[in-house]
Amino acid sequence: MTPLPKPPRLADRLLEWLVAPHRLEAIQGDLHEEFAYQVGRVGLRRAQWRYWRDLLGFARPWAVKRLPTDYSSPFFLHPDMLSNYLKIAWRNLVRQKLYSLINLCGLALGLAASVLILLWVQNELSFDSYHRKANTTYRVTNTLKVSGEPWIWSSSPLVLGDLAQRQIPDVERITRFKKPWQPINFRVHDDIFSEENSAFIDSTWFACFDYEFLAGSATHALDEPGSVILTENKARTWFGDPQTAVGKTVLMDTTLLTVQAVVRNNRPNSSFRYDVLVPIAASFKSAADRKNDLDWNNFNYQLFLQLKPGTSTAKIGQQLTQFYRAYKKDSTLTASLLPLKFIHFETSFQNDELPKGSRNTVWMLGLVGLVILIIASINYVNLSTALASQRAKEVGVKKIIGAGRGALFGQFLIESTLLTVLALGVALLLIWLSLPLFNDFTENQFSLDLGNGTLWLLLLGSVVATVVLSGVYPAALLSSLLPVKVLKGGNVLSLSNAKFRQGLVVTQFAASIILIISTMIIFQQLRFVQSKDPGYQRDHVFCLQLPFSKMMSGTRAIDVMKRQLRELSGVAAVTSANQPIVNNMSSHSGSLKWAAKPDDFTPAVSQFSVEPEFRSVFDLKLTAGRWFRRDMRLDTANVILNEAAVKSLGLKAPVVGQWFEFQSRRGQIIGVTQDFNFKSLHEKIDPMVLFDAPGWHAYIFTKVNPGATERVLADAERIWKASYPDKPFKYTFLDDSFAQLYKTEQKAGQLFNVFAGIAVLISCLGLFGLATFSAERRHREIGVRKVLGASVQNIVALLSKDFLKLVLVAIVIASPLAWYAMNRWLQTFAYHVAMPWWVFVLAGLLAVVTALLTISFQSIRAALTNPVKSLRSE
Amino acid sequence: MKRTYLGEFEEIVLLLVAALDGEGYGLGLTHKINEETDRAVRLNQVHAALHRLQEKGMVASRLGDPTPERGGRRKLLFTVTAYGYQTLQDIKNLRTQLWSDVPTSPNLAIV
């Protein structure tokens, strides 16, 4: 006989939950009987529908209302109950010392790592939003479209702001700042401080942006043109005590400034990292300076507008564009507004020096933080469900006495909360210890300031997330145990639970392996970047940047300095150019002309002004023609192209000898260089025009003989001081500036390294706990096996096999995921390593070996135990 | 005259409980009503009526035998109480008395 069709299971569950227990039997029986009858009459499907309909008819008070009971059952959050929970939780923690320790360490590590990451992520995401008027503040963006891709500038002419203030009624307030071309020198008493982080600001600056004034006031700080405002730290370095700094005077070049106010140090989430603020007026040393800045062609200022609420930004942008049309007589320029809060992540600007972030990095790290928290929570879930049999009797007895499922659920949740809070305490200690390192690494000033609301919110959020992730499943599982089964003895947990636990271990290891693979690939790529031949020699070369003002005064100054440097012993060669060769940002379009140029083709090319000696210093290779020569007078009009330029400009062979016009000078193409990487390897090698125009040069490159570096630098400083006594001597080795190009990647690599380590550590902690548990549970089995003749190897293999299988599955799952993610990352480089397959093998091996080592401690111990010990108790 | 609080539907259910003589239960009564009268009555309505009748003390219940199609659950069987039976009698007498006043061929309105 075929079994009778059953009514829908879900509906039955609903009914059992809905209807009062004392009425359930009659009602459910009737419903089932009716179902059986209707299946015969109208078929299974319609019977199921009717079942649902009939069932919902019982959602009436008379059917739902429960009988009152004779026994009181205290609310599960009653203080007495709470103290009972805590007592039992504490006893359990103390009784299971090893497991508690594993849980505590795992959670503390996970919490510490993720709180640190969250701290950083929160900081990045909240950039500049703390200003009270952040929502109505915008920065003016200028877009110049000459050909092909547009040029986007974050700076505007000084007068544009004045016009906006006067002529656009919807603009409530404007403010501007400019960063000086060079670090400014301040003379305080007899010391000279060269300040990189100084800025010239409008008098409305403090009305637009929020600063906390420690001395002086926001309203009067900028009343005088000869004022200077310092941050707390700067005031301390200059004057010792921030409080006494107000009223003191400093000398900026020749201008006398009075300290009017001291403000709190810049927040880590502020785009404006300036320690010395000086009114714009003080930056004009002469009427000519002022006239220069008032020129419509000089885009020196970042301009911020505060709009009246509800103003359309598009309309303001159009009005600003109209000003360009009317006053600058320029139709290629358009203005638009960028909200203040977006500035941090907007990286398309050509000359924006504000600290930039990358949304990708933020999300990626945020994800890593979450993954670590999940891995740590999995440990708790696994251990507490594995140990469920030890708590089962407690649950059974409590249920018989009358504890409800909800109350038991609450109890176990409170238990995991207790452990999480303990772990948070340890985590705070870890954070406090690692914060200086972390600050150093991220170049931020985070602190464990417990008066900070955001920090509390973060901590609370992490704790809640951890409790939810780690506590809910074990609590639900433990509170669901049936007293009859539990008290009868035997295995309380079903097989599906063990499967679930295995799934979690696989997840943990898969996540760890992905992190390991990512770390390895990042480092492979970084090594590739460092070791790839860029097409020129950069060893033992240091670079000096000439002061901007001196550069303008003609070519003589640079020639003198070069000659002096060349005469030093230990110097192999000296040359100069308009840009550092490591990262040439100068590009140009418009003035290029050549024989076969189509009329509508205005390509953008990188421009590199070099000189005859340049080639020998950097050992550039030519594929055709010759380099510039001192004895060829016409070479100042001639150009050399790189191979990319020959290709993209569509020049026909023979290239050498064709006429070429560049920057209004017509000459010949005298040579073609091999392509060399003059930007980071993220970018393809652009077409480049090399030309010989000494007037452009601002950078001097000195090649030093190996071993002579120290002496040459000392001598070079002496020469520099003699020529520019008021400018500090700053040099960079090309190797260093080359490394600087990949700083973000380097940091991401190191961060990944650390977090991959933490993830592996936490996963291994969990594995160790599980291995201990399984060795303990099977100690009798092991004893019997040994008595029957099993060897130590047999036992170790027996205990390790199950865990190894999980790690292998994790490798299989992790590899394609890691491949996909890292492939996408590698695509951000125009030149990258081929996906190294051995990394996957190595990471897999690493995971297997770590897992084996972790397990082996317990399994070998179990295998070596004398069987008499484990068997005599029976 | 003493009023008995009995709705029309409750009266039918009570009558059927009496008619089935101790063998009436929720589903059986529902089917019976659907067969005898021309209404589409639902299970929960009958259960609700039985619940109200029990509260008024007109029916008493006991548990019957389990059957396989009920998934081994027992029936809740209802029997009419003396008070319930008396109420039914009262209603019937009242009706009979009222009927006796109705002429054999009354004037019928034409609508």
Image: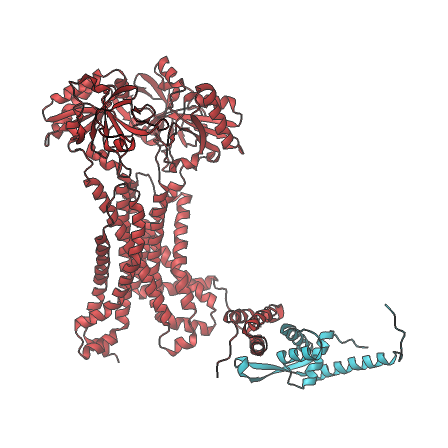
Which quadrant is the C terminus of chain A positioned in?
bottom left
A154, B87: nearer the viewer: A154
Asked if A456 appears above or below A627 in the picture, the reply is: below
The x, y position of residue A366, in whole percent, is 36, 48
Residue extending farthest to the bottom is B21
Supply the letter of whichever chain is red: A
A135, A733: nearer the viewer: A733
Say whether residue A827 is left or right of residue A6.
left
When asked about the image quadrant of residue A418, the answer is bottom left
Asked if B60 appears above or below A461 in the picture, the reply is: below
The x, y position of residue A489, in whole percent, is 37, 77
When asked about the image quadrant of residue A188, the answer is top left
The x, y position of residue A448, in whole percent, is 35, 44
Supply the letter of whichever chain is cyan: B
Say whether residue A678 is left or right of residue A221.
left
Q: Is residue B6 visible?
A: no
When asked about the image quadrant of residue A233, the answer is top left
